[in-house]
Image (cartoon, grey):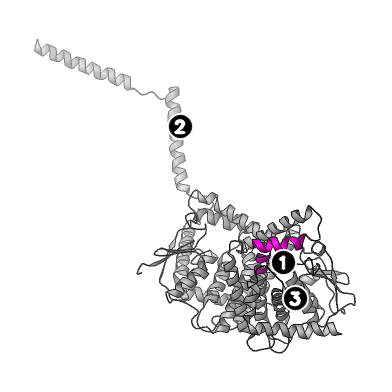
Amino acid sequence: MNRPMEINIWGGDWGLPSVDIYCLEVMAYAKFSGVPLQTCVTNNPFWTPNGRLPVFKHGKQVLSSLPEISAYLKQKNFSADFGLTQKQCADAAAYTQLLKEKLHLALQYVWWLDTKNYTELIRPWYAKALPFPYNYYYPGKYEQEAKKHLEALYDQDDDPLTIESSVYGEAEKCLTVLSVRLGDQEFFFGSHPTSLDATVYAFLAPLLKVPFPSPALQNYLKACTNLVKFVVRITQRYFPYAIQEYEAKKSAESGAQGKSDPESDFPNRRRYQIVAGIFATAAMTGYALSTGLVQMSTKDEVSENSADYKDLFQAAENTED
Amino acid sequence: MPSVLLTESLALELGDRTGNSIPAHEPWPQDVKLFQPYEVEQILLPDNANCLAVQTFLKMCGLDFEVEQRSNAEYMSPSGRVPFIKCGAFLIAELDPIISFVNNKGISLSDKMDNAQKADMRAYMSLVNTVLANAELYITWCDKTTLQEVTKPRFGSVLPWPLNHVIVWQKRSQVVKKLGVLGWAHKTLDEVYQEVENCCNALSVRLGNQPYFFGDRPTELDALVFGHLFTILTTPLPNNRFASIVRGYSNLIDLCKLVEKEYFERTAES
């Protein structure tokens, strides 16, 4: 089986290799275990087996969640967890559940249920990334899913603000626990990244890098300096291309902005001036012609010409005679 | 590194989820009551595990309480889940809020532990809360034989006809919805058993040869693990594979025996 392993993902932005938690998780895990993986940005979950990205393909194998993929990679002798003791594996399992229990809902909330984030940033981003006509369908669908998630876990009769503060409170506790556990270490179990590091990175990186309009939870994460350093370290070491792309894009944008700054109050000024000038000239000429202010002297010329022709004919006839 | 203390004290001033604010260091009152469904005829596996965990936690703290059994305990609870305690003017439901309530009285099982151990404890409590609790819900409400033979008769035992059918159906759809969003509803029974196996394995490895999870003194984690494992071991179900998975880990069984001996038989004698 020498066919390349391939993964279809959501695209990246803001210095992230992908904006989606689960895509990031699989990508980071593959990097940590040294799997040569081709990434393919599809931004379209419609043709996937269960309506979700990422999709991992290797020959006939099509898998879509990290436990399945890591089990498959283990058969192929790739794993990020070979160096762990049994106790460390148990700890990794426990912390993974902690993230899923406490942080997952909070991220869904920040992403889809915080109205300001959703309308100003998330929905436009997904609408732009998804191809037509899916861009009208998926953002709303994901919002509904997040709403369902919240309704199933919290009493709907409660005040929305109390629910929000309780969701964020749980997430903040979880971040503190992670920060304590990481301490000054490079990764959670020493100097080598493991599956737990992949999961933590996947949950924290989008929360840290996406420029949310309402950044309550993001600010809390920024205060946990060792977690911020952890995310930056992994991005720089394993996904340098994402940062480079983002910086190139940013500098291109700021360059374009710098040029158009004097005209920023009225973009494309010269073009509008020319178009307006042409329109005005055309309108005035049309009016002048239609009211007869200016008369084209085509008739006279024709009669003159025809007179000339007559002369010529007459001259010709005369010579013939 | 920001401390949780700040947000917690803020929550205290503003009032917690049940709308109560808790004055610190007021002594534990005498007439604390723990409300739960009827243990013999009504209670179901997941609720029983949670009730036992709270009872164990309070006993480990050395706090007095009386168990009140009510058929409608679930509807009396401020969060809609059992058990809940009535302590003076406050109603507090579920283990986590009860733990923080007791901590605010200056009583804690984990105050001698360092921060890293506390972090580990939280992570393992999450593991138990997600894996074991969801597996219990799955077996109780999604497994067809258990639903017909155990869940429906027990849950409906306190309700008159036709409510015993309607409410069971309503409750089931609620639980299925919750399991659905957590990604458990589409699992097969074998996958659920596999999750339980993995969870027990992690717990067993972490416990090792120690009497309790963090040395010689019991912690909140021990109370939670005991609540779940003891209930799984002692609840008769049509399919006892759940219990036999737990029986495969002798050190977890030893933990259950130790906690039972220390905190339940002693009080029964006195």
- What is the quadrant of residue B139 in the picture? bottom right
Q: Is A38 left or right of B153, judged from the image as shown?
A: left
Number of other residues with Cα within 10 Å of mark 2, as a class: few under 14, some 14 to 19, many 20 or more: few
Q: Position of residue A177 (x, y in %)?
A: 65, 77
Residue picked out by circle 3? B53
Disc 1 residue crowd, few under 14, some 14–19, many 20+, Cα 10 Å? some
Q: Is residue B150 magenta?
A: yes
Residue that appears at 25% across and 20% down: A305
Asked which secondary structure carries label 2, the reply is helix
- Left or right side of B54 for B191: left
**What's the CA distance linking mark 2 and mark 1?**
66 Å
Q: Which residues are magenta?
A: B135-157
Q: What label does residue A283 carry, if any?
A: 2
Answer left or right for B54 relative to A175: right
**Distance from label 1 to label 3 (Cα)?**
23 Å
Q: Chain of mark 3?
A: B
* Percent position of residue B7, x then y: 73, 73
Q: Quadrant of residue A147?
A: bottom right
The disc labelled 2 sits on which kind of residue?
A: Ala
- Marks 3 and 2, how far apart in space? 87 Å
- Quarter the N terminus of chain A occupies: bottom left
Observer-nearest of A100 and B168: B168
Compared with B56, B72 (above or below) is above
Depicted B200 relative to depicted A288: above or below:
below
| Label number found at residue A166 | 1
Q: Mark 1 and 3 residues: CB-CB less than 8 Å, in contact?
A: no
Q: Amino acid at mark 3?
A: Ala
Q: Quadrant of the C terminus of chain A?
A: top left
